[in-house]
Image: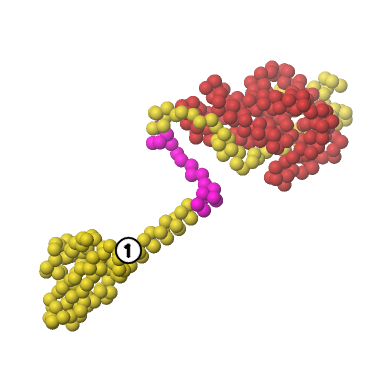
Amino acid sequence: MSALLQDDEHDIIERCREGDGDAYAVLVDRYQSLAYTVACRMLGDADTANDIAQESFLAAYEGLRHFRFGSKFSSWLTSIVLNKCRDHLRSRRATVGIDEIAEIRETRRRNPEQEASAGESADAVQKALDGLPPDYREVIILKHIEELDYQSISEILGVSIPALKVRAHRGRELLKQALAGTGVER
Amino acid sequence: MKDERDIVHRLLDGDIPAAEKDSIIRQIQDDPVLRKEFDDLSSAVGLIEQEGRLKPPLAFTASVMGRLPGRAETLPARVKRFLFGSRVLRWNMATAMAIVLLTVVTTTLMMKQMTHQEALYTAAGPGSSVETVRLTFVAPAAKRVAVAGDFNKWRTDSHLMTRENGMWTIDLPLKPGAYTYMFIVDGAHWITDPHAESYRDDGFGYRNAVMKVSI
């Protein structure tokens, strides 16, 4: 992130803390795609991801007074999104049987825009991601979709870099196996 | 094999020092098993990376902003935002249509009101709260005299006076109020009534006559 953007965000966050709710729209607009993508890739369901991403922005707004300047708002927001995704996955596991989870994954709904652009490859990738343990999935998403370095991922997840690399290695191996039988290629 | 796989992952992570990179790549190319491992992993990672970010629903930001809890803004912040804050005009089709409808209704009502007032000036019916005022003007040599004023929007041909023994007269049914007027002689000469109650400058160097009507 450029220093200019960070200064700009500092001002915006200060204004939000003073009670200027409208200023927050700039942050939502800037990071909506980040929050939505992370939630969507974690959960594999567009509607739920939309809810989780919105709730994450609301939680971030509520917690802005705890935000520490010097760290990135995007990293902080991402950690909130991932926490909410983990909570959702835990509650889903507690209330739905394994067979039903498989069914949900098969019938997961996409919004019309996604439907239009989602091809065979996108479906195969999401299915492969769905099959990863959440710990591996979040590292793969941050590393290979958000293209973050391990230092940033470590700050978001609170996990050491060596441990993250192990998760990334194992996650990639599982992805390779999952995608091998689909016939989908780059 | 595990160590060899680690090499592939380190390469994908960009963890191989530049000095070692060429020899590692040669090692992978020379080993069919390792090369397949590298190709498969690169392909899987490439598929994930090419997916990129997803587009959120169009109304995402508006939806979040609509759900924010109301917060009491401090006075200095409110003043600062009022003076220096940029504003975004948000609209939707329903609001736009409502504004257009409101404009049409308001314009129609105003036009109706104007027409109604004009009708009162020109032909007030019996029983309405109007008073008949007689204007007289002495101009024996004139062939045609009319009166124009703000009661008839200064039309020069709508209120012709009638001649009686060299004196021109007209009866005007008017609602209470003050009206400015002038006589037009032979369609060309504007004459101020010399016997008017009072006068008012017309802004063009002439004086209009003023009559006051009361019940």
Residue A83 locus on image (x, y percent) = 67, 24
Pinpoint the chain carrying mark 1.
Answer: B
Provide the residue designation for mark 1: B117
Residue in the picture at 52% in, 32% down: A24
Chain letter of the yellow region: B
Residue in the picture at 55% in, 51% down: B93
Residue B88 counted in the magenta span: yes
Q: Quadrant of residue B3?
A: top right
Is B205 displayed left or right of A94 in the figure? left
Residue in the picture at 62% in, 33% down: A54
Is B3 displayed left or right of B115 in the figure? right
Magenta range is: B80-98
Residue B20 visible in image? no
| Number of marks present in the image shown | 1
Residue B69 visible in image? yes
Residue B59 counted in the magenta span: no
Residue B195 locus on image (x, y percent) = 11, 68
The 10 Å Cα crowd at callout 1, few under 14, some 14 to 19, many 20 or more, is some
Residue B73 locus on image (x, y percent) = 44, 29
Is A164 displayed left or right of B106 in the figure? right
Chain letter of the red region: A
